[in-house]
Amino acid sequence: MIKILFVCLGNICRSPLAEGLFRARVGEAGLDDKIVMDSAGTDSYHAGQPPDARMRALAAERGIRLDCTARNLRKDDLLEFDYVIAMDHSNRERITRVHERIDNATSRIFLMRAFDSVGKPDAEVPDPYYGDNADFETVFEILDRSTRNLLSFVVKEHYL
Ligand code: 4NP
């Protein structure tokens, strides 16, 4: 089983959408028995909460269900998941710091937009939390493209 973890700050906006979009693409590709996904936040402010209502509404409009519960990134995630995908540089730094504290951590850490066909590979998925509807739409478009390309990458990498 290939395990992929999406990580943002609060685990209520960007990473739940990345997880939901990716799950939908994996389902469409008939790969549910080969790839599993989850999401987490580098902070625990919103732990236990459902995804942000604005993100849930936008995703629902586009046929994507978000039903995760926010949780904090755990040390063990760096042992359990094959790929840990950070939404921005700050998330990536936090993940890398945890990774460095674990001797046998095997996760590969990537920035989400390394898989985007638009923009630079080190671009970030912007935090929409204090933004408006247009900011949420932008995040949707970025993650829609990036999760499709991430799936193509994983399929090739693992000969699926
Ligand atoms: P996320 O968005 O990291 O995409 O889930 C945020 C959610 C909450 C906060 C910041 C970003 N916050 O400051 O509470």
Image: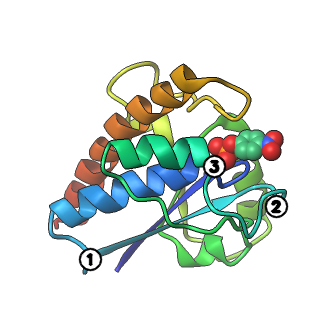
Q: Nearer the viewer, residue 111 or 23?
A: 23
Residue 98 — which label? none
Of discs 3 and 2, which sits in the foreground? 3
Residue pictured at 48% horizontal, 45% vertical: 57
Read off the residue under disc 1.
34
Q: Nearer the viewer, residue 144 or 123?
A: 144
Read off the residue under disc 3.
52
Residue pictured at 56% horizontal, 70% vertical: 106
Report, in whole angstroms, how far the alpha carbon at label 3 lies from the one at label 2. 14 Å
Report, in whole angstroms, how far the alpha carbon at label 2 lies from the one at label 1. 30 Å
- Ligand 1: quadrant of the figure: top right
Amino acid bearing label 2: Ser
Q: For mark 1, give the secondary structure.
A: loop
Residue labelled 3 has its Cβ within 8 Å of some atom of ligand 1: yes
Q: For mark 3, give the secondary structure.
A: loop
Residue pictured at 53% horizontal, 31% vertical: 136
Amino acid bearing label 1: Lys
Q: Quadrant of the C terminus?
A: bottom left
Mark yes or no: residue 86 visible.
Answer: no
Amino acid bearing label 3: Asp
Q: Residues within 10 Å of mark 3 (few under 14, many from 20)?
A: some
Residue 38: x percent and y percent? 51, 68
